Image (cartoon, rainbow, N blue to C red):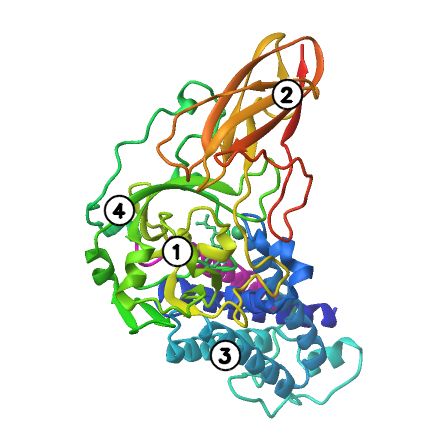
Amino acid sequence: MTRARAAAAGALGVASALAVGELAAGLLAGMPSPVDAVGQLVVDGAPGAVVTGLISTLGAANRPLLALGTVAVALLLGAVVAVVGHDRPWLTSGVFAAAAVLGAAASVAQPGADVLLVVVVMALAALVGHTVLRRGLPTPAASLRSSGQAIPAGAGPTGSTVGSPATAPPLARRGFLRLAIGTGAAVLLVGAAGRWWLGGGRIDPASIALPTPARGLPPPGPDLATSVAGVSPAMTPIDDFFRIDTALGVPRVDPETWRLRIHGRVDREVELTYDELLALPLREVDVTIACVSNEVGGDLIGTARWLGVPLAEVLALAGVRDDAEQLLGRSADGWTAGFPVALALDGREALVAVGMQGETLPAVHGFPARLVVPGLFGYVSATKWLTELELAAWDGVDGYWIPRGWAKEAPVKTSSRIDVPRPGARVPVGDVVVAGVAWAPTRGIAQVEVAVDGGAWAVAEMVPVGSEDTWVQWRVDVPLGPGRHRLTVRATDGDGAVQSEGPRRPAPDGAEGWHAIDVEVV
Ligand SMILES: Nc1nc2c(c(=O)[nH]1)N[C@H]1C(S)=C(S)[C@@H](COP(=O)(O)O)O[C@H]1N2
Ligand SMILES: [Mo]
C-alpha cells in the first residue's frame, strides 16, 4: 500500500511539474513546450531506419502519440523514483533537478527559446513537482507504522533538501486522497489550458495583410469537384492541406525578428527582414507539392496558389557563384533540405513563399516564409520556417533526411490517383463515373487512362489547367456489369513517359505503381 502510495505521489509530482511547464509554454512567448522539446530530442536522435516511418509521416496521429509517450515515460520515472527514494529526499530532489536540466536543455534548443525564461520555468516546475511528491509521500514513519513496528513519537524524517518540505507532518490516507484528487484535477486543468494555448499560436499570421502581387494569376479555372462529388478539389482547401514535418510543436517565428540569410558560395552575403522580403515583387504560382512518403493512392499531396518572391530573384540579390552546386534551405527549427542549385535557376517557378490560397502562410505550413520548388519532393526542397539559403558544394553537405536513408535527388514521379468511386464502394450497374487527379509537376500531364479488370485502356477527359506544375483532374465513364471489378489508372506526362507500373515502396525516392481499386457493382 505504501509503495503504491509512493508511486502515486511520484507520478503526481511529475504531472504537476509537467503541467507548470506546459502552462508556461502556452502563455509565454520564448517558452517552448518542455514535453514537445524532449519528444523532439527523441525524434532527432532516433536512428533513421527505425523511425523513418513514424517521423516521415509525423502526422495527425503520431504527433500527440509522441507527446503522450513522453508524458507516460516521465510519469513512470516519477513513480519509480518516489518508491526508491521515498526515504531519501536527496535522491528525489536530485532526479527532479536532473530532469529539469534535461527539459531546459531540450527547450533551449527549440526555435525562439528564451534561455533565462526556460531556466526559471524549469526550476519552478521542478520545485512544484518535487514539493507535491514529498508532500504526497508516506513518510518513513508512516511506512514503519504500517509494517507494524513501533517507533518513538516525533521521530519524523529530517535533513530535507532544497524545496523539499519533507519535514512536514505525514499526511493521513484521507489527506493524501484529497491531495491526489485536488492536485490531479489542477494538473489536468492547467496542463490542458497550456496545450490549448500552445495549439493556438501566439502570432496570428492571418492578422498580417500581404501586399498584392506584382504578377497575379487569373482566378482558378473550372473545378471537377463541383460536378463530381468526392474528387479532390483543383485547389486544396488550406484546412485540408497535408502537414508533414519533424517538428513536434509548431515552430512559432516572430516576423519582427525573423531574418532570411543568403550565404555560402555567393558574391555577397545578404540578410532580408520580413518587410524587405515583402517589398520585393511578389508573384503567384499554382503548384502541387507532394511528400516522398506518399503511398500509391495516398493523400500526402496538395495543390495551392502560392504567393512569394521568385527564388531566382532572391538568390540574385546575393549573386550565386559558379562553384555553388547545392542550395540548402535551413529552418528556424534546424531542419535542412538541399537540391541542385541549377534547378532553382532553370526557369521553373520556385518561390520563397509567404502566402498560400490567398492567406498569409499559416504557422503549420511555414510562417513567415518557406520554399516551394515545383517538381521536387518536399523533403529535399520545401523548407518551412525558412531562415537560411546556403549555397554549398554538392558533396559533404546533406539535408536532414539524406543520412536517414532517403535519396539525395528526388524529383516527383508521374503519378495518378482514383478518388471516385471509393475503394470497396457498391455502385449501380451501368456507366460508372471514375474520376481523380494526376500529376507530374514541371512536365505536366498529357493523358490519363483507366482500365477495367486489366482490359483495354480508356482515355479520360482532363480538366484544363493553367500550369504544368499542378495536378489535373480527370474523369471517364466506364460501363460496368454486375460483380466485383478492378479499376486501374495510369498517367502519361508531358515528356511522353508513361507512369511506372511499379510497384515500389516510398523509400528511398518515392513510391511507384498504378493505383487500383476494387468496386462492387450491383
Ligand atoms: N522546417 C521543416 N520544413 C519541412 C519539413 C520539416 O520537417 N521541417 N518537412 C518537409 C516535407 S518532408 C514535406 S513533404 C513538406 C510538407 O509541407 P506541408 O506540411 O506544408 O504540406 O514540408 C517540408 N518542409
Ligand atoms: Mo515529405
Q: Exactly how many numbered labels are in the figure?
A: 4
| Nearest the eye: 309 or 194 | 309
Judge depth for marks 4 and 1 and give the one in front. 1
Task: Give the amino acid at mark 1.
Answer: Ala
Task: Give the amino acid at mark 2.
Answer: Ala
For the N terminus, which image quadrant? bottom right
Q: Which residue is mark 4?
A: 283
Residue drawn at x 63%, y 57% as measured from the top left: 52
Instruction: State the image coordinates of residue 164 (x, y, percent, origin top left).
Output: 54, 84
In this rendering, would 113 be left or right of 434? Answer: left
> Magenta residues, as a range?
176-204
- Of pointers 1 and 2, the one earlier in the residue sequence: 1
Label 4–label 1 contact, CB within 8 A: no
In this rendering, would 105 be left or right of 372? Answer: right
Q: Which residue is mark 2?
A: 451
| Nearest the eye: 80 or 296 | 296
**Mark 4 surroundings: few (<14), some (14-19) or many (≥20) residues within 10 A:** some
Q: Which residue is mark 3?
A: 127
- Of pointers 2 and 4, the one earlier in the residue sequence: 4
Task: Give the amino acid at mark 4.
Answer: Arg
- Of pointers 2 and 3, the one earlier in the residue sequence: 3
